[in-house]
Amino acid sequence: MGVFSGLGDKLKHVFSKLTARGKLDEYEIKQAMREIRIALLEADVNFTVVKDFISKISERAKGEEIVKSVTPGQQVVKIVHDELVELMGSKNAKLAVSSKPPTIIMMCGLQGAGKTTMCGKLGALLKKQGKKPLLVACDIYRPAAINQLQVVGKNVGLEVFEKGTQKPAKTAEQAVKHATNNGFDTVIIDTAGRLHINDDLMRELEEVKKVVSPTEILLTVDAMTGQDAVTVATTFNQRLDVTGVILTKLDGDTRGGAALSIKAVTGKPIKFCGVGEKSGDIEVFHPDRMASRILGMGDIVSLVEKAQEAMDEEAIKKMEKRVKDANFTLDDFLVQFESLKKMGGISEVMQMLPGMGGRFKFNEKDIDEKRIEKFKAIICSMTKKEREHPEIVKSSRRRRICAGSGTTIQDVNQLLKQFEQTRDMMKKMKNNKGRLPF
Amino acid sequence: MGIFAKIKNALKKTKDAIAYRLNKLFTGGVLNDDFYDELEMILLSADIGSETTESILDELKTQIDKKHVKKSAEVRILLKEIMHDILDFELPKEEYPLVILIAGVNGVGKTTTIGKLANNYKKAGKSVTIVAGDTFRAAASDQLTVWADRAGVRIVKQGEGSDAAAVVYDALQSAKSKNTQVTLIDTAGRLHNKVNLMEELKKIDRIIDREFPEAMRLNYIVLDATTGQNALSQVDLFNEAIDIDGIILTKLDGTAKGGVVLGIAGEQEVPVVYVGVGEGIDDLEKFDIDDFVSGIVDAE
């Protein structure tokens, strides 16, 4: 199976023989569609959805003039990408607020999708926005589920309403009353995970819905879900008429085709994504990023944003100037390490890049985060002069530095070599008008 | 929205539809392109993945030529044989003391599976210790305690947030001193692309080797049957970290077929050992290849 290579690369191959300009050729389109089909299937988009999508795209591609500045491959990718964005996008992706408080949000989904964790994240997010949410424990089946919600609630500083294992509809009803009487403006109801084909449990959800009339019914779906996502989403939607979808575990390396499948069969907006294990790891859904991800093109946008967050403006300006002056020093190198760490470490950065998809086969040594710690120690053991002019670091200085930082001569050599390479790369970047080297 | 309505209709009776299509497919006469297209759809819909589906179909066509098969009913038998062969592995014979490490991504059903495994071994007359190695997820050890009580076995646990490796270390000493035959170690769910969490798992794996060298070791990954092609990446990276001996495929009681294990078996040679088919303590079965394959290509 190897590394997921981006759709762009594959299409480049398909179109490599195509030199004539003008309209996209039918044969090439057919070949390209084959690649797109495989890409979508490998991303777990449901095959029925793929089939319809492909026929729609083929129609659009046929009439398309090839723009001069791009290759036919790039152009087809763009058509596919745009179409995906349009299909997955929604105007009403924001959480609805009830005109008569409290706003009631009911979570539902299969076992293990991440409902309880998401209740905590959603609650924390709303709290940050100035709301006063109440979490309600209605999972009366899974051992210790109520406990889990209590711990989650405590961690994010939210009250949890529970009535043990009494009927969920009753608990939900009492919770809403409790919220009204105690000034909670939002109620988030956690429910037990259930199979969509379990009629009794699905009826239980219908009862909860009937009793509390939720403002939002959010279907929580694991982003790694395969072909069955359509069956699950269709069934939940048919029985509950859900108002939106939450995708969880998007911090994995899944391509997440389930997002497209679910949107296609339910038409309901995807509102949020779970992107980590901490309570703050929740994001609004970005259809454009998801489209790139499904196509195996990496999440460049997220990467760039993360990079911007991690490096403060001033540091960037300073660094830019230094690169410009080819005056990049070990101090700047240190700043780079720090920001890399803030971005979640090298491994996290790598897996957001196209073609990496968590399967990067980098030299293990290169991504060893302990080594970065070592490098930091070494730089911190250098004098100001040495940091600015690393070329003066010769044998006796080397010995002093490695003694001071608790490392070996080899480590120091390695750092200096790496620094030199980076500086060279920086110079190249400068010639590239500041474009990132990847 | 035309496309949505169309799909919705197509999926209305997915299950019946697939059953109907399967029957139609294998009772119809001609083995033409339409036949193979339809067959491809059925395999893809079971999460077998485009690559594995293609190689299965290639093999099928080769055999059809070789054996001069003309009837679609015979094709069904051939197809089953091919899939059977992919999934057929010889499993190691279990010896005691046995330490089973259970790993996997979040929400696949590790804790529940441990409860069921404990019950199985207890019923088989073995002494069992469960180790609550998930010290991260809120109330994970409470959940596991309920399962230990249900199965009637010992559990070793420490507070939430304690070091998982330390919990395992202590638990192994205790298991050894009590002459436990089967030690089942739960671990926190972790996404396979998180380097730090995988390092933690490697550490636990090393500790077991070091502290209990006389025990037979089995490392199982728990996969959710609803998972698509990402399962390949999961097994790949978990296998790289701790040498996976087998797969426990959970949630097969839904509508998902779990066909991704065919790709895993084919590429990474990791066998499926158990399947989870419900939430009850007895709902863990030894993997039956014929049943599994039948679930994909036979109409119920």
Image: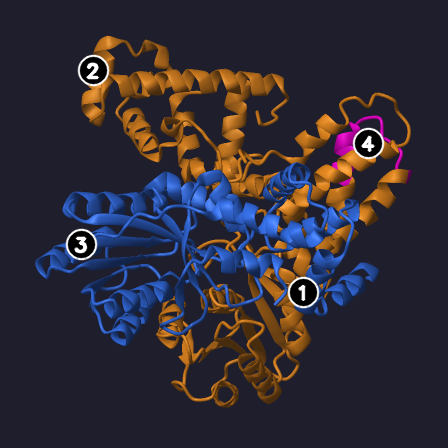
Chain colours: A orange, B blue
Q: Nearer the viewer, mark 4 or mark 3?
A: 3
Front in this rendered view, residue B165 or A227: A227
Percent x, y of residue A184: 50, 81
Residue lying at 31% horizontally and 16% vertically, measured from the top left:
A413
Q: CA distance from mark 2 to mark 1?
A: 74 Å
Q: CA distance from mark 4 to mark 3?
A: 61 Å
Q: Is residue B117 magenta?
A: no
Front in this rendered view, residue B73 or A224: B73
Chain letter of the residue carrying label 1: B
The three-letter code of the residue at mark 1 reads: Ala
Q: Is residue A73 magenta?
A: yes
Percent x, y of residue B212: 16, 48
Front in this rendered view, residue B131 or B273: B273
Q: Is residue B39 above or below residue A123?
A: above
The residue pinned by badge 4 equals A28
Q: Is residue A373 above or below residue A232?
A: above
Chain letter of the residue carrying label 2: A
Q: CA distance from mark 1 to mark 3?
A: 45 Å
The three-letter code of the residue at mark 2 reads: Arg
Q: CA distance from mark 2 to mark 4?
A: 62 Å
- Examine the image and state in which quarter residue B159 appears: bottom left
The residue pinned by badge 2 equals A399
- The label shown at residue A74 is none
Range drawn in magenta? A63-78
The three-letter code of the residue at mark 3 reads: Pro
The residue pinned by badge 3 equals B97
Residue lying at 55% horizontally and 72% vertically, measured from the top left:
A108
Q: CA distance from mark 3 to mark 2?
A: 51 Å
Q: Are marks 1 and 3 on the same chain?
A: yes
Q: Mark 4 or mark 2, which is nearer the start of the sequence?
A: 4
Q: Mark 3 or mark 1, which is nearer the start of the sequence?
A: 1
